[in-house]
């Protein structure tokens, strides 16, 4: 009887102390980010000390995330966002007292809330964990997927809510944190982060990083591989695989000029260094504005510096997005609309109005085409994303419509007044996260009222479609390219000195009734199927497929889709194949290409082809 009672008491004690016990729920914040489980109004993570080991064989990261927290509400728990993480144990304070925690059943979009019981005086929460091999943020590239074919490669991609799949965090752009990191990698490899970075390989494979300026969690980034560095100026430089380094340095030779041009518009560059790393082809985006170290796709290495507007775009994010960040993903246009506008101003300062206007017009036409396929409500600048993935808001609308909105406002006075206003927006709100309503209040007080400007702001921000007073970009060079396309039946144009932008517009403007024979002749004369410019390839492959010129170019299309992992560049081609009756070819190619794609890319393609 006594033995039985003792066993029962021990079991009861064990159950009571079990780390999986659910803490007492805290009161929710009615203004909380709908894409985060965290309740930072009650208990907030402020600084991260990250210690991870990179295992290429298992395709995992393992170690600890030690969060310095503040608990102004004296809450009994702190909540982190996670997605598919192996949480091993959690401790509190420097004395490492083991904590009770509960990992909530996962949501298909948001992942799992990690609820940790804390005390009113708790200031440190250390999470022992490991990622899984299919973590959504992690891009594991085999040596065969790199240019040098020598070593494997790892990169992370946290935007919008993927950081939680490799770091347990309060994963909202409205939360700003600082971080230090110790990363251990196989010897012979370099690790770099969105932080102060090494410029030489560490002999023992151990690297330390520091980011002492507050950033949103989606901007924590890591890359590991066969990486080398080359300076461009005292504060700019490039990282790439050694076999690509000289080519990348030549392509991005104007980086310092871009920084100077940007500073002349909107104030000092706040992040110390502006470096760029060119990643393997599996990187899903054109670029990612990680502070201090922009991640870039190799598809911008065209050999003629024709696609460097991407660098200007990511640099512009150092102000719009990194310095002042959208508070929620419904406010995404505050990041991207400002950045597209700012990018155009940088390109205009360096390469002239014609160059910037060509890019603006091309993307304006892309916006109009994409809006035809969007729900009306998703053509607003601020959209409702509650219950939806934040990626649902990642269309051309926040980018190009947002930029056109700012261009319209600029034209209400003059550039001097407008630039002073934007400079004050960044300076007044630096290192904070803001909502659309915050910006509109600032706009009203410091621009509209100050200069007695009347503008249809509500229509631009909260109504669908393109307002009638939208500035329409007009490039004479693109107009000539379109005229040449309209008259293609009468002969081929003189394309000497055409830019890639003119080629793209010419291809996209070819008549709907253009015959396959016309495409064959164009290909024979201009070798467009063999182009090495990613933007020309995209336009040519998509338009050719839609005009029935498929069989002849399908091997090159397949090679392109296998080698290029940038979502924007591949999705349009897969869609063209699907919509023209070649869905089985698309699925066959995707099965071959998928291992080299990041989850962001393959998820979008998989959804398209299902």
Image (tube, helix red, strand yellow):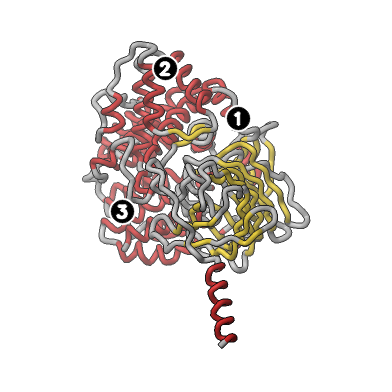
Is residue 517 left or right of 173 when viewed as pictured?
Answer: left
Residue 421 percent across, percent down from the top left:
45, 18
Is residue 99 left or right of 346 when viewed as pictured?
Answer: right
Q: Which residue is mark 1?
A: 270
Task: Say which of marks 2 and 3 sits in front.
Answer: 2
The residue nearer to you, when weighing 168 against 416, is 168
Considering the numbered disc 3 on the image, is that residue within a helix, a strand or a loop?
helix
Q: CA distance from mark 1 to mark 3?
A: 43 Å
- Give neighbour class at mark 1: few <14, some 14-19, many 20+ (Cα, 10 Å): some
Q: Which residue is mark 2?
A: 446
Residue at 55%, 65% (x, y): give it.
Answer: 19
**Mark 1 or mark 2, which has the lower sequence index?**
1
**Mark 1 or mark 3, which has the lower sequence index?**
1
The residue nearer to you, when weighing 128 against 202, is 128
Residue at 40%, 30% (x, y): give it.
Answer: 358
- Give neighbour class at mark 3: few <14, some 14-19, many 20+ (Cα, 10 Å): many
Indicate the quadrant where residue 10 lies: bottom right
Q: CA distance from mark 2 to mark 3?
A: 46 Å
Residue 328 percent across, percent down from the top left:
41, 41
Q: Is residue 316 visible?
A: no
**Mark 2 or mark 3, which has the lower sequence index?**
2
Task: Say which of marks 1 and 2 sits in front.
Answer: 2
Residue 391 vs 403, above or below: the answer is below
Position of the C terminus, as image quadrant, is: bottom left
Q: Which residue is mark 3?
A: 576
- Give neighbour class at mark 2: few <14, some 14-19, many 20+ (Cα, 10 Å): some
View extreme (bottom): residue: 1
């Amino acid at each position: 009887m006594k033995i039985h009672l003792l066993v029962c008491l021990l079991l009861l004690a064990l159950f009571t102390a079990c780390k999986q016990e659910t803490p007492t729920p805290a009161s929710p914040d009615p203004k909380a980010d709908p894409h985060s489980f965290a309740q930072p109004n009650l208990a907030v993570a402020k600084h991260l000390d990250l210690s991870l080991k990179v295992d290429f064989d298992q395709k995992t990261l393992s170690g600890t995330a030690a969060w310095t927290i503040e608990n102004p509400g004296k809450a009994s728990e702190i909540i982190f966002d996670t997605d598919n993480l192996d949480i091993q144990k959690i401790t509190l304070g420097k004395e490492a007292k083991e904590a009770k925690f509960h990992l909530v059943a996962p949501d298909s979009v948001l992942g799992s809330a990690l609820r940790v019981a804390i005390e009113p005086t708790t200031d440190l929460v250390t999470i022992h964990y490991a990622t899984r091999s299919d973590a959504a943020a992690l891009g594991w590239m085999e040596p065969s997927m790199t240019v040098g074919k020598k070593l494997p490669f790892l990169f992370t991609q946290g935007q919008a809510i993927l950081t939680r799949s490799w770091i347990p965090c309060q994963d909202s752009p409205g939360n700003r944190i600082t971080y230090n990191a110790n990363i251990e990698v196989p010897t012979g490899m370099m690790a770099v982060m969105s932080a102060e970075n090494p410029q030489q390989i560490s002999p023992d494979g151990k690297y330390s990083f520091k980011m002492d300026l507050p950033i949103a969690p989606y901007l924590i980034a890591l890359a590991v591989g066969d990486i080398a560095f080359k300076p461009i100026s005292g504060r700019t430089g490039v990282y790439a695989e050694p076999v690509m380094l000289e080519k990348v340095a030549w392509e991005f030779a104007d980086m310092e000029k871009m920084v100077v041009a940007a500073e002349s518009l909107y104030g000092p560059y706040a992040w110390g260094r502006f470096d760029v790393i060119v990643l393997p082809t599996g990187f899903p985006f054109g670029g990612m504005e990680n502070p201090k170290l922009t991640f870039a796709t190799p598809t911008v290495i065209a050999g003629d510096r024709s696609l460097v507007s991407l660098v200007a775009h990511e640099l512009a994010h150092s102000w719009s997005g990194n310095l002042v960040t959208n508070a929620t993903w419904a406010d995404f246009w505050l990041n991207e609309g400002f950045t597209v506008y700012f990018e155009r101003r940088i390109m205009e300062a360096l390469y002239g109005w014609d160059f910037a206007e060509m890019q603006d017009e091309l993307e304006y036409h892309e916006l109009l085409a994409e809006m035809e396929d969007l729900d009306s409500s998703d053509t607003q600048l601020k959209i409702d994303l509650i219950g939806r993935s934040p990626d649902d808001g990642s269309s051309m609308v926040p980018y190009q419509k947002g930029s056109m909105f700012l261009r319209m406002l600029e034209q209400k006075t003059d550039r001097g007044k407008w630039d002073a206003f934007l400079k004050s927006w960044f300076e007044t709100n630096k290192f904070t996260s803001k909502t659309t309503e915050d910006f509109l209040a600032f706009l009203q007080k410091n621009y509209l009222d100050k200069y007695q400007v009347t503008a249809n702001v509500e229509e631009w921000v909260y109504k669908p479609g393109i307002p009638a007073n939208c500035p329409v970009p007009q490039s004479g060079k693109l107009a000539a390219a379109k005229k040449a396309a309209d008259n293609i039946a009468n002969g081929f144009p003189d394309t000497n000195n055409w830019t890639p932008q003119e080629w793209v517009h010419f291809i996209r403007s070819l008549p709907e009734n253009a015959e396959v024979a016309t495409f064959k002749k164009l290909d024979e004369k201009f070798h467009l199927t063999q182009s090495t410019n990613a933007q020309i390839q995209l336009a040519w492959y998509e338009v050719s497929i839609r005009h029935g010129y498929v069989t002849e170019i399908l091997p090159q299309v397949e090679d392109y889709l296998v080698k290029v992992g940038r979502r924007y560049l591949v999705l349009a081609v897969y869609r063209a194949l699907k919509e023209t009756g070649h869905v089985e070819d698309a699925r066959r190619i995707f099965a071959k290409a998928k291992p080299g794609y990041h989850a962001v890319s393959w998820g979008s393609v998989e959804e398209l082809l299902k």
